[in-house]
Image (cartoon, helix red, strand yellow):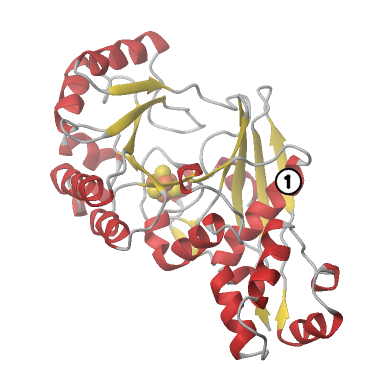
Amino acid sequence: MIDLKELTPDEIDRLCVHQLGQKPGQGHRVAVQLFRKRMDDIDGMTDLNRPFRELLKRRCTITRLVADRSEIAEDGTTKLLYRLGDGNSIEGVLIPGRGRLTLCISTQVGCASGCRFCLTGAGGLVRNLTPGEMVNQFFAAARFAGERPVTNIVLMGTGEPLGNYDAVIRFIRAATDRRGLGFSPKKVTLSTCGLAPMIERLADDNIAVSLAVSLNATTDAVRDRIMPVNKAYPIERLMQAVRYYGDKTGRSVTIEYVLFKGLNDSDSDATRLGELLQGIACMINILLFNPFPGSEFQRPDEERAYAFRNLLLRSGHVAVVRSSMGRDISAACGQLRAQAK
Ligand code: SF4
C-alpha cells in the first residue's frame, strides 16, 4: 500500500495515471482533497466518484499521527510530542505571533550534528523522517491548533534538514504546491547548522524556500567548540556557500546567532560578524540561549543582546533581537523528547 502523504501532488497524479488508469489531472484532485481539504480518509473524498475512490483504496492508504503529549507556555507557545509508528518520538512547536502561527517541524529522529547547546544533538541520529511523517506533523499540529490556521512553517525541529535532503525537498514541494499545503515559499523556512555543499545544492536545485543558517560564532575556535560541523565546514567555507546561495538564487538569507554569555557575545564578536557578512544580503536574528538542566552555557542579559545588535546596525546590517518564546516550558530543542524516554 502506498501512503498518499509520502507523495507530492505531481507524484499522486502520475500514480493515478500510470497505476490506476486515470486521465492526467485526476490525481491533482486527490491531492487537493488530501492536502488542502485535510481529508485523512479516502472514503471522505466525496468530490471523487465512488469507483475512483474504490480504486484508490485498493492501492493507497493515508497514515495519521496524533500529538501524544503537549505543554503550553504562558505566552501560548505549545510544544507537542508525537509518537511515530515505530515507537520513536519527535517534537513540534506551535509559536503564536501577531497575525501568525508558526509551526516548527522535525526532519529526523535525533540528529548527527551534535551541537553542544542542543539536547537533541547529545543523543545522536536515530533515523531520517519520511516526507509523509513531516506532512503528518503538519496535520497533527493543525488539528491541535483548531480554528487558528498555521501561517508559517519552519524546519527547525529535531534534526538537520539538509542531512535528510531528498525527503525534506519532497516535503517542501508538497508544502509549497498550490495543490499541496499551498504555502508561499517565503513562509517556509529551512534552517541548517551549516552543511556547506548541501546549501550549494539547494541553490543549484532552485528549491523555492527561505534559508536560515545557524552561525553562532565568529571564530573557528569558538564554533568548533559549540558546533562540531564546523570542523568539516569551517566559517570561511560556510560563508562561501552562503554567498553562492545568495548570488545564485537572488534570495536574502537569515543568519541565526544564539548569544552565549562570555563566549560569543562580545563587541569584537559583533564587529567580526558584521565583517563576515559584508556584501551578503541577509537579516541577522539574535537569540538569547535558553539554558536547560545540565547545560554548560549561560544566557546573557538582554542589555548585552541589544548592545550587540546596535553594533551590527551601525555596520549597516539588518539585525533583530528575537524574544525567547515558551521559556516556562521545556523550551530547549529535544527537552520534551528527552523527558518522554
Ligand atoms: S541544533 Fe539542530 S543541527 Fe544542531 S544538534 Fe540540535 S537539532 Fe541538530
Residue 201 image point, x, y percent: 28, 61
When the figure is inspected, residue 161 is found, relative to residue 148, above or below; the finding is below
Q: Is residue 21 left or right of residue 324?
A: right
Q: Residue at x 85, y 68 (%)?
A: 44
Q: Is residue 323 left or right of residue 138?
A: left
From the image, which quarter does the N terminus lie in? bottom right
Q: Is residue 264 left or right of residue 56?
A: left
Name the residue type under label 1.
Arg
Q: Which residue is under mark 1?
A: 69
Q: Residue at x 60, y 81 (%)?
A: 24
Q: Residue at x 69, y 47 (%)?
A: 141
Label 1 SS: strand
Q: Is residue 147 left or right of residue 89?
A: right
When the figure is inspected, residue 93 is found, relative to residue 77, above or below; the finding is below
**Residue 272 sits in quarter:** top left
When the figure is inspected, residue 97 is found, relative to residue 159, above or below; the finding is above
